[in-house]
Image: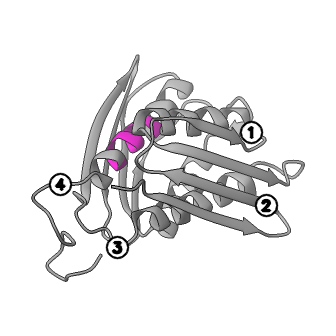
Amino acid sequence: MTNRIGKAARKTKETDITVTINLDGSGKAETATGIGFLDHMLESFARHGFFDLDCRCSGDLAVDGHHSVEDTGIVLGQAIADALGDKKGIRRYGHFLLPMDDALALCAVDLSGRPYLNYDCTFPMERVGELDTDLVKEFFYAVSYSAGMNIHLKMLDGQNSHHMIEAAFKAFAKALDQASSFDPRTKDVPSTKGTL
């Protein structure tokens, strides 16, 4: 079976972004978004989902991080959708409960083709490194809508914002890895509609 590799790019007056993802990779990541903590989260996402990821973003960080974070989510979602292709044989659903020290994050995904984000995460700090913590929601919203993916992300416990955000990204990675993996019992698209 060949690797499922997706690519996407977006260039606006605010950002210039390219993303390549291999859903059947080994967890290697090359990231350069200009926001160190976002790079760390994307590297964690790749490592724990066993995705090979190359993500490059040049954005208007002199304004703030909003455009870079949101647009990176958009392009990552598009690349994931491209890599999934027709979705034949995948499990479609995935979920993971992930502990990280004080933090406990729950993520469930449905690769349904219908975007939806149910997000229940509150962080004690307004910033971690150079990342505004309210942009975590913007990132996952953008991924959901550009990938056509249902994401439920809930922070069940935690006191340290770094741990909590990292737990969320890792839980998402594990849930997406499960949902995008192949089920040997499924030869077609896992839907009564015949398409996802």
Q: Secondary structure at mark 3?
A: loop
Whether tag 3 and tag 4 are in contact, CB under 8 A, the answer is no
* Amino acid at circle 2: Asp
- Distance CA(mark 1)–CA(mark 4): 37 Å
Disc 3 versus disc 2: nearer the observer: 3
Q: Residue at coordinates 81% horizontally, 49% vertically from top-left?
A: 64
Whether tag 1 and tag 3 are in contact, CB under 8 A, the answer is no
Whether tag 1 and tag 4 are in contact, CB under 8 A, the answer is no
- Please state if 139 lies on the left or on the right of 179 as rendered: right
Binning the other alpha carbons within 10 Å of mark 4 as few (below 14), some (14 to 19) or many (20 upward) gives some
Q: From the image, which quarter does the C terminus lie in?
A: bottom left
- Distance CA(mark 1)–CA(mark 3): 33 Å
- Distance CA(mark 4)–CA(mark 2): 36 Å
Q: Which mark is residue 86?
A: 3
145 to 119, vertically: above or below: below
Q: Residue at coordinates 51% horizontally, 54% vertically from top-left?
A: 140
Disc 1 versus disc 3: nearer the observer: 3
Q: Secondary structure at mark 1?
A: loop
Residue that badge 1 annotates? 35
Q: Which residues are magenta?
A: 169-176
x and y, in percent, of residue 56 in the image: 72, 49
Q: Earlier in the sequence, mark 2 or mark 1?
A: 2
